[in-house]
Amino acid sequence: MHSVLVVDDYEDTRELLEVVLSGRGYRVFTASDGAEGVRVAREARPNVIVMDLFMPGMDGFEATRLLKDHEDTSATPVIAYTARPSPLGRHEALFAAVCRKPCPPDILLGLIRDVLTRYGGSPRPQA
């Protein structure tokens, strides 16, 4: 079974994505800010991370930089998940894909499948 870590400061977003992703067979971990996301990613070793970029405390850019700099999580693909247009700029290389909020569930699921395929995972979660 593939796993996804959802990092977002809005509880409603975390809960919605957890329901959608777990309903499609993914094991889901959640974190409410960048620092917690880094900790959970290092412990849980998810197959892919969906990372909000603009959060209080440690934002998604810094959290992703820390993940990419750590040997246990450097190869884990991160999908930027944001409502802001063109937010990446010089940070584009950190992310495997970008998903704009609000995002229909089928679009996010397709991005996750594509990222898993590009980074050596199976395109479908295993049940």
Image (cartoon, helix red, strand yellow):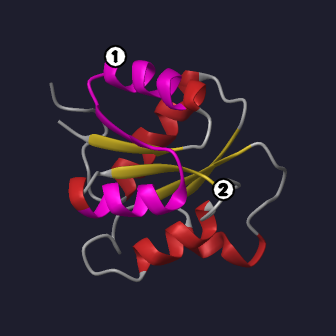
**Residue furthest to the front:** 57
The spot of residue 63 in percent (x, y) is: 52, 67
> In the visual, does 37 lie left or right of 106?
left
Q: CA gap, disc 1 to disc 2?
A: 25 Å
Q: Residue at x 28, y 31 (%)?
A: 26
Query: Any magenta on residue 10?
Result: no
Sooner in the amino-acid sequence: mark 1 or mark 2: 1
Decide: is 80 above or below 62.
above
Q: Residue at x 31, y 39 (%)?
A: 123
Give the residue type that dot 1 points to. Gly
Q: Are marks 1 and 2 in contact (CB under 8 Å)?
A: no
> In the visual, does 2 lie left or right of 33?
left
Q: Mark 1 or 2, which is nearer the eye?
A: 2
> In the visual, does 29 lie left or right of 90?
left
For the residue pair 36 and 63, the one nearer the viewer reads as 36
Give the residue type that dot 2 points to. Leu
Residue under pointer 1? 23
User: What is the number of the mark on residue 53?
Assistant: 2
The spot of residue 83 in percent (x, y) is: 77, 42
Look at the image and give the residue range highlighted in magenta.
Answer: 14-42
The image quadrant that residue 127 belongs to is: top left
Q: Residues within 10 Å of mark 1 (few under 14, many from 20)?
A: few
Q: Residue at x 67, y 29 (%)?
A: 103
Helix, strand or loop status at disc 2 = loop
For the residue pair 114 and 67, the one nearer the viewer reads as 67
Q: Main secondary structure of the magenta part?
A: helix
The spot of residue 82 in percent (x, y) is: 70, 46
